Image: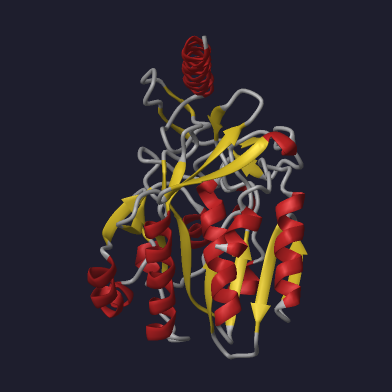
Amino acid sequence: MHLLEKILPIQSPSYQEEQMIQFIKAHCRALGCKVWVNKGNVYITKGKASRYPCMVAHTDTVFDFIPQEHLQVYYYEDKVFGVDTRTSTLTGLGMDDKIGIWIALKMLEEQDHLKCFFPHAEEVGAHGSAKAAMSFFRDVAYCIQCDRMGNSDLVTEIYGTKICSDQFLNDIGGLMGKFGYKPSTGALTDVYQLVINGINKSCINTSTGYYNPHQMDEYIEARDIFNTLDFIRSILALLGDKTYDLPRSYSKHAPYATRSYYTPAYSKPVQAKQDNNTWEVYDCCSGCGHYTVIVEDYFTLCQACYDQYYADLFFTYERKSRQNLEESSTREL
């Protein structure tokens, strides 16, 4: 847990990820890895090989900065969560995707030959992976991302696009049963964007042991994150650098009615924070039901519903905080 204890307090909102990027760079250089940063994305290569497995984890979180001295990581029984000591209320640590970063770095420590891709700005629409340097993936055998809540999902299809070959699934089927994983469909994340970019290698996204992502009461279950760690370790030991191509028929864009990301044929360009090379995402908002631009992918919310959701969430926690304070004062009296 020593490495994880270093990662969890690092704050890295989207497009403000420099602290996390610097930590990753320093850790990987200490392991003797080649480190390359381009357009905010971090590319790591360890060892010399003709083919490499590749781990993927994004560097940003959805939470804004709070004063570092007031961000406290708490460990209670098998759970880990964050507390804002100014108000004694729960706060998010960004387990999505700090647990994925931890697993990727642990694999770098253990493996002789491995590549890692740490894209930025996933939480605002996979902006980093949309601009990935695809030449980095020419000698990649397959990609594993750990960016899914829960403890049992192995995402093989996203928005109607298969991101993993049947052969890959067949080969790890025994491990999936052993560690309690099953095939699942998923939402936007970096490996999906890599498939859309044309990586043509099998990719998966696994549950990682965090719960209530993007919410102030998010937490991790220690037994689940270590189960994921052992699962990934076992996959790398079993498959090594065996290549699993993704059949071209698998990597077609999802139908527009379902959703399509970063595809000029289906989307309109908008102004991004740093440049204009991003695209709007349209879908039916789960809050109001309108077909409009989506800003929050986990819950499929438009901007208005997103703002209302988090306003209600903060109101709830503020009310609970006042109640706890009043109860504490009453007990003291």
- The structure residue drawn at horizontal position 38% and vertical position 49%, both measured from the top left corner, is 254
Q: How many marks?
A: 0
Residue 227 picture quarter: bottom left
- The structure residue drawn at horizontal position 55% and vertical position 67%, both measured from the top left corner, is 104
Q: Foreground: 81 or 207?
A: 81
Position of residue 31 measured from the top left corner of the image (x, y, whole percent): 70, 78
Can residue 259 be seen from the camera position used here?
yes
Residue 202 picture quarter: bottom left
Position of residue 143 measured from the top left corner of the image (x, y, whole percent): 48, 70
Position of residue 127 measured from the top left corner of the image (x, y, whole percent): 62, 47
Can residue 207 be seen from the camera position used here?
no
Q: Foreground: 74 or 216?
A: 74
Q: With respect to residue 42, does 62 lie above or below?
A: above
Q: Foreground: 200 or 116?
A: 116
Residue 40 picture quarter: bottom right
Instruction: Give left or right: position of 92 versus 287.
Output: right
Q: Residue furthest front?
A: 333
- The structure residue drawn at horizontal position 73% and vertical position 43%, both measured from the top left corner, is 16
